[in-house]
Amino acid sequence: MNTVKFKEMKDGSKEDYLFLDKLEKKYVNRTADRIIKFMSGLTSTLEGYKITRLEHSLQTATRAFNDKASEEMIVAALLHDIGDELAPLNHSEYAASILKPYVSKKTHWIIQKHGEFQMYYYAHHLGGNRNQRDKYKGHKYYKDTLAFCEKWDQSSFDPNFKSLTLQDFEPMIKNVFSRKPYSYW
């Protein structure tokens, strides 16, 4: 069988869905390769920044690596802004969705909320609420998200910073995305 027999999903047979499941599993197993390819293309930047989106991601991940963060958190730091290209108004949620099956609830929450936490550094200049993150005070991952933003994300726009390369992070990406997906979701 090269393709399914149905034209509408409701008409699919068990044979069709077993065939598709087999192909889907192969596709899922190549997620890390697609992410690496996508990241390698982030060589342009949003207007006005001194570095590319890729370099910002590499700097963030390198800082996490230098601080001896877990492999999962280093990969999350690398991918935290992956949503900027396709979901610029909700990039944090986009990145968190990509990571969700493969990372802990803590890592997922940090990435999902980092965009709101980052507003602390600039929202007041634009008439916004820089303290929007305060609504999460008391959450068990609040301080971890503050640290993510302060130590790694907001400080990673330096054209003179020496980052590791995307190739340096490839084994970590492959390790994280080859994990059995978390079942707690």
Image: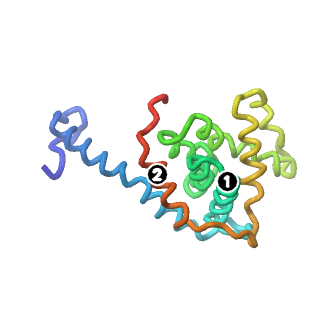
Residue type at mark 1: give it: Ala
Quarter of the figure with residue 5 = top left
Question: Who is closer to the viewer here, 25 or 118?
Answer: 25
The residue tagged 2 is 175
SS type, badge 1? helix
From the viewer's perspective, is 23 left or right of 174?
left
Residue name at image x 50 percent, y 46 percent: 98
Relative height, residue 158 to residue 115 (above, below): below
For the view shown, which residue lies furthest in the bottom direction?
160
**Residue 83 position in % (x across, y down):** 58, 52
Residue name at image x 42 percent, y 48 percent: 178
Residue type at mark 2: give it: Asn
Q: Earlier in the sequence, mark 2 or mark 1?
A: 1
Residue name at image x 30 percent, y 50 percent: 26
Q: Classify mark 1: residues with Cα within 10 Å, few (<14), some (14-19) or many (20+).
A: many
**Residue 154 position in % (x across, y down):** 76, 54
Question: Who is closer to the viewer here, 89 or 29?
Answer: 29
Question: Who is closer to the viewer here, 163 or 16?
Answer: 163
The residue tagged 1 is 64
